Image (cartoon, rainbow, N blue to C red):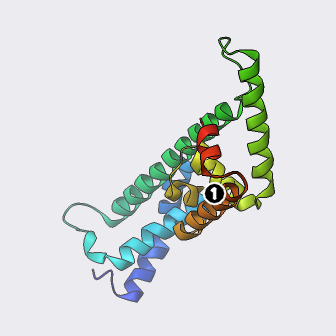
Amino acid sequence: MDISDPTIYTKIYEQHRRGVFAAAFRILGNEAQADDVAQDVFIKVWRKPASFDSKRGELGSYLRLMARSRALDLWREGQAAGRASDRLKNVVIVGASNGDDRPDQVLERSEATDTVVSALRTLPANQREAVVLAYWGGLTAEEVARRAAVPLGTAKSRIRLGLTKLRDEFGEGYLAANAA
């Protein structure tokens, strides 16, 4: 069977698309994401038909396994993004004192936090999200891109532009001192 033949590929797609979608949907529980996974699987098979070896098993099983693996990757990314979001919420609650701080230190930290939050509000929403996720949330540019569903270059540009605007307003030393 020559998967690279468009007519055979079409038949394979029609025969296995529901099973591939179902395998992804069982893990993700989201139709749009499951559709994306199914599309990824079939694109990979189309681009590299030699990756399937009929001696190792049936094509349907191979396709569903690919879908399951990709869906698990997406699910794990979502879990990591959720943990990053939780870390970000903890960082934002900087006003909470640990009990050992002097009142003047608490006030200074609170004022610095208010200043940074006000400056972040001046950024366009997409830049603000990218900066907060990358700078305080600890996500990489690639993770920011996936989370915002934009190309990697766009995510990097948003982070860079947002940080540049903040640096122009405060100076580089101020942001570094108040990021912790």
Image point 60% across, 46% down: which residue?
A: 173
Secondary structure, mark 1, is helix
Q: Quadrant of the C terminus?
A: top right
Judge whether 133 appears above or below 59 on screen. Answer: above
Q: Residues within 10 Å of mark 1 (few under 14, many from 20)?
A: many
Can you give x and y, in whole percent of width and height, for residue 43 in the image?
A: 43, 74
Can you give x and y, in whole percent of width and height, for residue 88 in the image?
A: 64, 38
**Residue at the limit of the structure toward the left, as seen here:** 55
Residue type pointed to by label 1: Leu
Can you give x and y, in whole percent of width and height, for residue 63 in the image?
A: 39, 63
Image point 33% across, 66% down: which residue?
A: 59
Q: Nearer the viewer, residue 134 or 163?
A: 163
Can you give x and y, in whole percent of width and height, for residue 163 in the image?
A: 63, 57
Q: Does residue 83 appear in the picture of this structure? A: yes
Q: Nearer the viewer, residue 81 or 113?
A: 113
Judge whether 120 appears above or below 95 on screen. Answer: below
**Residue at the limit of the structure toward the top, as seen here:** 99
Image point 30% across, 63% down: which residue?
A: 58
Res 114 quadrant in image: top right
Does residue 3 appear left or right of residue 117 in this picture? left
Res 136 quadrant in image: top right
Judge whether 79 appears above or below 142 on screen. Answer: above
Q: Quadrant of the N terminus?
A: bottom left
Image point 45% across, 51% down: which residue?
A: 73
Does residue 106 appear left or right of residue 149 in this picture? right
